[in-house]
Amino acid sequence: MKSDIEIAQEARMKPIAEIAASLGLADEDVIPYGRYKAKINHRLIHKAGKQGKLVLVTAISPTPAGEGKTTTSVGLADAMNALGKKTMLCLREPSLGPVFGVKGGAAGGGYAQVVPMEDINLHFTGDLHAIGAANNLLAAMIDNSIQQGNPLNIDPRRITWKRCMDMNDRQLRNIVDGLGGKVNGTPREDGFDITVASEIMAVLCLATSITDLKERLSRMIVGYTYGDEPVTCGQLHAQGAMTALLKDAIKPNLVQTLEGTPAFVHGGPFANIAHGCNSVIATKMALKMGDYTVTEAGFGADLGAEKFLDTKCRAAGIEPDCVVIVATVKALKLHGGAAKETLGEENLAALERGLPNLLKHIENIVGVYKKPVVVAMNRFASDTKAETDFVIAAVEKSGAKAVFTDVFLKGGEGGKELAAEVVKACGVPSKLEYAYDLKEPVAKKIEDVARKIYGADGVDFSEEALAKIGRIEEKGCGDLPVIIAKTQYSLSDNPDLVGRPQGFRVSVRDIVLKGGAGFIVAIAGKIMLMPGLGAHPAAEKIDLTGDGKIVGLS
């Protein structure tokens, strides 16, 4: 079979003006970025219109085998259009960190991709660069304020705002800057986060207008004074210039799938260290343009889906009509302890041991959030009938429906059975319930997520975390949603505990108030806000040929 990038490069894309016209968009609302990409007027979110049904795609806890969540999202949208259901697709923008680190690309795979694939995976329309520039402008203005007499009385030891870059670079996690004498600033400990973990990314994805964006930026806390008072972006008068940098980034990006399904690819916060969903503007706009909108949330349902349901849905006033959980037989066998090199062999024992991970995610969506579930199993040639029958029976026993798909090989045609089940599930009346009440104390909200969603026995807070929670509640900010940053590889905060771990506790070592985004981040376990590269990063395989063709993206 051809590689992902070969398939994408051979695709005959429709002009983006044609895709826009199919959505009923006026010429003045479409800003072309070349022939196959465009930005759309963000103000259309406020235009009255019908409300389509929303399908959320999530997954089991990810494994090295890969589950194919984005591939399934793309294939499902194509399949629903093939069944005559006018469907939009809403995805996140890939970060250069995982593109050059682990994934090598994040635009789907096989015959279920969004295109132009190379553009989407690399610089796209420049949104992430704009976010990085706005982030680092604020960082520069913080240090400049200190250099210019420190009128805000900022304690350099308590600056919480970090610089950022869209790359996996562990070397920059912790640095000392301002060296070289008085003219070069005040020496202090500093560091970098990856751009997709920046609060500006969260703010952009939750904002509903330029005014809302600017107000959210102004509320962002950058550090504390010597008197323990928070210092905000607004006090530095930085929000106006930052909004100017983000004036185009707030507009959703319109592209298409290989089969011509319209797709908004906009915003890209990680789900393990941020809230893991594409922009509210893109999602709400898509809901007005189609009968169905397929969107995804990052990593497993304990991360992206939990944050989508408990945070994004609250902020946007939306809820999914159906949740699709993606899994593979191979991934379930990994959760069951099978060695990676043996995944092509039938192993019902490992499959049985790994299935509880999938069943826990189903249990959470159905039992906690009260939403109907369809399980999408990406089919591999090595899957045996005994294995597929075993999964289908186990899932049906849990009260859900499992469908094996072939969207990687067949595109929309390979997802029609899944699409039919999703349409059926969307017809089942449901009302979203949340994992916690916003009025609960902060620690209780974190405990609720850990106990209900992860299956933990409880949460252990560091003294520092408890002290910060106390200060947040004293300042009247305790009624915000919580975002838990933890490993994606386990339901626990320990990446080695695969499957459905039992008898564990979650360790929260730090708490960060994101005043602009409007949530509280709990940092659990050893999760880092700046990832590192592996021994053989995907960047080693990516290249540009002499005739200008990119190779190695997948």
Image (cartoon, rainbow, N blue to C red):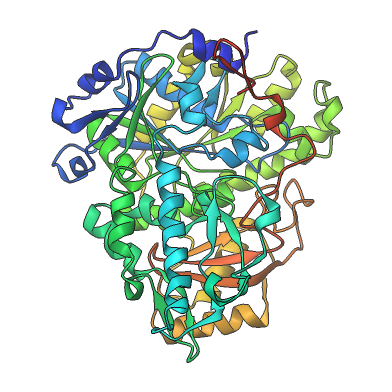
Picture coordinates of residue 387 (x, y %)? 74, 24
Q: Is residue 31 left or right of residue 122?
A: left
Q: Is residue 350 left or right of residue 531?
A: right
- Residue reaching furthest to the bottom: 227
Vertical comparison of 397 with 485: above or below: above
Picture coordinates of residue 456 (x, y %)? 68, 63
The residue at the point 40 percent across, 14 percent down is: 259
Relative depth, front residue between 30 and 55: 30
Relative depth, front residue between 74 and 516: 516
Check the picture and name the quadrant holding the N terminus.
Answer: top right
The residue at the point 28 percent across, 19 percent down is: 19
Vertical comparison of 233 with 6: above or below: below
Residue 398 visible in the snapshot: no
Residue 404 visible in the snapshot: yes
The residue at the point 78 percent across, 36 percent down is: 334
Picture coordinates of residue 128 (x, y %)? 45, 44
Q: Is residue 145 left or right of residue 212?
A: right
Check the picture and name the quadrant holding the C terminus.
Answer: top right
Vertical comparison of 230 with 140: above or below: below
Relative depth, front residue between 518 and 105: 105
Residue 266 is drawn in which quadrant? top left
Relative depth, front residue between 363 and 480: 480
Please tell me how many numbered marks the rendered image carries: 0
Residue 176 is drawn in which quadrant? bottom right
The residue at the point 33 percent across, 12 percent down is: 14
Picture coordinates of residue 8 (x, y %)? 51, 14
